[in-house]
Image (spheres, rainbow, N blue to C red):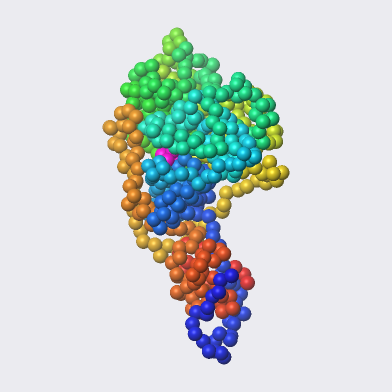
Amino acid sequence: MIEIPPGAYARPGTSLDFKTGTWRVERPVHDRRAAPCHAACPAGEDAQAYLAKVENGDLRGAWETIVAANPMPAITGRVCHHPCESACNRGHYDETITIHGVERFLGDEALREHWAYPVAAPGSDAPRMAVVGSGPAGLAAAYHLLREGCRVTLIEAMPVAGGTMRTAIPHYRLPPSILDQELDRILALPGIDFRPATRLGRDVSLEELQSEHDGLFLGPGRRKGREWSADFAVPGDLHTGLQLLETWVAEGTIPQQPKSVAIVGGGNTAVDLARVLRRQGVEQVHLISHQRIPAPGVPQDDAMRATYREVSQAIEEGVTIHEHRGVRRLILRGERVVGMELVHMKKLADADGRLHRVAFEGTEAVLHVEHVIPAIGQDVDPLGFEALVERGQMRVEPWWGELRKHSGIFSGGDARGDHGTVSEAVGDGRRAAIGMLRRLAGKSLEPGAPPEPIPYGELNIHYFESAPAAHEPVLPAAQRLGNEEIEGGLDGRAVRHEAHRCLSCGDCLACDNCWTLCPDQSVLKTRAVAIDGSNYVFDYDYCKGCGICAHECPTGYIRMIPD
């Protein structure tokens, strides 16, 4: 209980005897609401919270705030599509906060300084959980299960951890040294029993894992290429985009050296492969997509799944993108491709109102290429858990990730089918870990939902000054020749600048506006932090409900409610 003295000295019989709060029809309350960056982050990071710690000079505390949700910020700070920035309220004022740059800086700082994860070793009698797959979803699930006091058996079919982060993300986006350092630190945590080169269905059975563990998470990824043809024609030298991309990442070269290539697809694999082929020396690289190039204002359901940043850099590097195009047929000479017929595609509604891609007759055009590569997606290889896979993916409940027809088994990441980024996979693993523990405790798995973000219109922007964002250095297109990392990181000064630009949406700035501007001295400042996390309380005996405190609050932390 905090003892609060009156705001000023008063004698008996003066105004303190008249409790003017009885006139009130509304009263102010503190209501911490989620910043849009927090609500938009698929990994669950609260950027507003760690930016506040950065501004206060507490870099390690900021990193610990991140790893409470995401254990690999040095990785995601490089490869995430950062929807947090698209949602950032600051973008309505001048420029969005460079959140991914701050995240990357903190992740790299933790690697340099060897900051230990704030995780305790589990007891010998702790629940034992099994995680299959050491991609981002499996690693996040193992990490969060460990944070909650569980022992974890982490099984990986490959000799090393990382999943598609290691096999399919080019080194110019994610240097191997960063990947190794971050993953080695996670795998070294006491309580994680990492078993590489152990394949489910070959070295261990699903039944064995279930009998020896208290919970099971499956994060097998998707590496089985889908069949592809154009009007039933298939080139004799057909390889999928993922196969060729994995060859480049592993060996630094691709055996085929045609002068012109067409890649069919619009996801990250297609774009990464297109950029790799340009580095390989292929003169003409064409990318064929049913969707449009992602850009501000393009509807999400009509945009390529690849991120705007990656697509923009691919265009800078000489990749030609054919929007709203489909492949009508291949032009073959024997089994060798010499061209392809493209047709314009558009979304149209059918009789039931559902949208479908439709080819526009009369818009056909021939594109002369020597090679075609499908990058239309992959399926889960079901070896060892065939009964759990439906149409190439794991069908799960949308929030916790429990399989719909198999209670007690959870899944996430690429295997879900509706996700395709590292940060989404991290979020899947985190939520699944919580769901596994709830299931173990016999609690219901009520569907969750992201927090409701505070909108820009509820901020008092007059208390902030315009300031340009700090942007990371980017290699010029002419210098992007091999595996050099394209994007550099922010320095400490730029990171502090970005933290200072944060509007602290929905949280208390401790700016004293409410305390200094209240005409009735009904806002009292406390020495200790109050129960709501602020340093202010309302004295409702004398608050008339005028609303000045709420109106002048820069961040929307105070709102008026009926009394």
In the image, taking residue 396 as reference, residue 66 lies left or right, namely left
Q: Residue furthest right?
A: 442
Q: Position of residue 199 (x, y in %)?
A: 57, 23
62 and 42: which one is in front? 62
Could you tell me if residue 347 is visible in this image? no
Residue 511 vs 197, above or below: the answer is below
22 and 341: which one is in front? 22
**Residue 369 falls in image quadrant:** top left
Name the residue at 53% across, 36% down.
139
Could you tell me if residue 478 is visible in this image? yes
Please give the count of numbered marks on the rendered protein: 0
Q: Position of residue 152 (x, y in %)?
A: 59, 35
Q: Position of residue 349 (x, y in %)?
A: 58, 36
Span of residues in magenta: 74-78
In the image, taking residue 242 as reference, residue 562 lies left or right, namely right
Residue 2 vs 372, above or below: the answer is below
Question: Is residue 36 on the magenta stretch?
Answer: no
Name the residue at 50% across, 60% down.
507
Name the residue at 57% across, 91% down.
13
